[in-house]
């Protein structure tokens, strides 16, 4: 089936501003799961008018998981259907080190901007000089980012270095997501780390038997929420093909994540319980991962003139 985006990218008004997607999840086995936790806070439990809820996976963690859908960690490259997209590859002594797709801050990574090889930094500085003063020209900035890392237009970017237009260049996430659970209850348990050689040994140095407790949760309902900001994507001014590429990439990430990539932690292995539903715009359904996978290569080829590097890859050599 060919991809049809006319419901989300129509040629005339009214144009929808969001694609909102929800997917009900459940543990693949049993009923317990371990949510995300935070230092000095633990699990993020909160009360609403509907009762007690729990943050299962945060927006920042979901952004990383969605971006990982593009990457082949064994081959240190984009997955086959996405090859040709722009990104920065970092090598050290001729071997792969990292990339703008796998780095936490994407193009703002110190391995990209802080190494002795300053060629890329100087190029980026030259291309962003005009943004230091006055209102930010988002279409122009989007064109620069598209050139070097198209995924940063989906997942956001903050170029914090003062040498780059005074450190004011920010692009918020166009694709955001989180997972929440409702009707939650604590499932308390525990265990012990056994030392069969010296059970009474000093625990501070790793010896001895060490008991521990852990809190997992059960829930009446677990839901993943996804939000594609169409208004922001249109505001990039990349033209029809650029808009189609970004929206298709965003939907590809969502569909692929839901298609069996929901093992957030050892004790948090989830699966989709029912077909994902699109709550906005009316009449649109999330395309299958197969349809999106087939559509992406043609859109990449159509936008290839906007990408830098060899087949979209800009190489940076890192040396401390």
Image (cartoon, grey):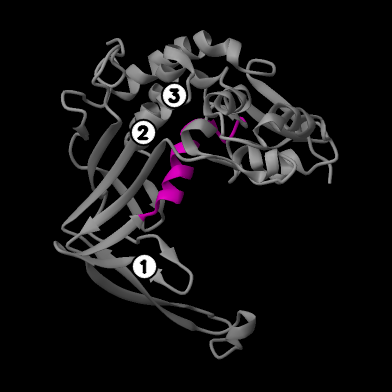
The x and y percentages for residue 299 are 46, 12
**Looking at the picture, does residue 29 appear above or below residue 32?**
above
Q: Which residues are magenta?
A: 57-75
Q: Residues within 10 Å of mark 2 (few under 14, many from 20)?
A: many
Q: Residue at x 45, y 50 (%)?
A: 61
Q: Secondary structure at mark 1?
A: strand
Q: Which tag, 1 or 2, sits closer to the chain's start?
A: 1
Q: Quadrant of residue 122?
A: top right
Image quarter hosting the N terminus: top left
- Residue 94 placement, left or right of 70: right
Q: Which tag, 3 or 1, sits closer to the chain's start?
A: 1
Q: Secondary structure at mark 3?
A: helix
The residue wearing badge 3 is: 246
**Looking at the picture, does residue 83 appear above or below residue 145?**
above
Q: Which of 136/116 is in front?
A: 136
The residue wearing badge 1 is: 43
The x and y percentages for residue 291 are 32, 17
The x and y percentages for residue 75 are 61, 30
**In this rendering, which labeled residue sits more in front, label 1 or label 2?**
2
Q: Which tag, 2 or 3, sits closer to the chain's start?
A: 2
- Residue 96 placement, left or right of 43: right
**In this rendering, which labeled residue sits more in front, label 2 or label 3?**
2
Is the residue under label 1 in contact with that under label 3 (CB below 8 Å)? no
**Looking at the picture, does residue 185 appear above or below residue 237?**
below
Residue 60 lies in the magenta stretch: yes
**In this rendering, which labeled residue sits more in front, label 3 or label 1?**
3
Q: Secondary structure at mark 2?
A: strand
| The disc label shown at residue 229, or none | 2
């Amino acid at each position: 089936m060919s991809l049809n985006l006319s419901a989300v990218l129509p040629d005339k008004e009214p144009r929808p501003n969001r694609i909102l997607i929800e997917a009900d999840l459940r543990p693949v086995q049993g009923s317990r799961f371990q949510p995300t936790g935070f230092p000095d806070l633990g699990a993020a439990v909160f009360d609403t008018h509907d009762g007690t809820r729990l943050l299962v996976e945060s927006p920042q963690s979901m952004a990383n998981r969605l971006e990982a859908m593009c990457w082949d960690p064994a081959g240190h490259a984009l997955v086959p259907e996405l090859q040709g997209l722009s990104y920065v590859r970092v090598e050290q002594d001729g071997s792969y080190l990292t990339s703008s797709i796998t780095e936490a801050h994407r193009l703002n990574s110190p391995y990209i901007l802080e190494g002795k090889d300053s060629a890329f930094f100087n190029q980026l500085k030259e291309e962003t000089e005009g943004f230091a003063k006055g209102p930010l020209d988002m279409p122009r900035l989007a064109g620069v980012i598209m050139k070097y890392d198209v995924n940063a237009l989906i997942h956001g970017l903050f170029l914090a270095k003062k040498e780059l237009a005074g450190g004011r260049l920010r692009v918020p996430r166009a694709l955001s997501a989180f997972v929440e659970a409702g009707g939650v209850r604590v499932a308390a348990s525990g265990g012990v780390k056994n030392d069969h050689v010296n059970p009474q040994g000093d625990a501070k140095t790793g010896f001895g038997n060490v008991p521990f407790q852990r809190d997992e949760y059960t829930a009446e309902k677990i839901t993943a929420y996804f939000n594609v900001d169409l208004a922001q994507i249109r505001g990039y001014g990349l033209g029809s093909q650029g808009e189609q590429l970004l929206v298709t990439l965003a939907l590809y990430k969502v569909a692929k994540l839901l298609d069996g990539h929901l093992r957030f932690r050892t004790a948090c292995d989830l699966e989709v319980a029912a077909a994902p539903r699109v709550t906005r715009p009316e009449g649109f359904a999330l395309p299958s991962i197969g349809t999106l996978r087939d559509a992406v290569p043609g859109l990449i080829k159509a936008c290839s003139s906007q990408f830098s590097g060899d087949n979209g890859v800009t190489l940076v050599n890192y040396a401390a």
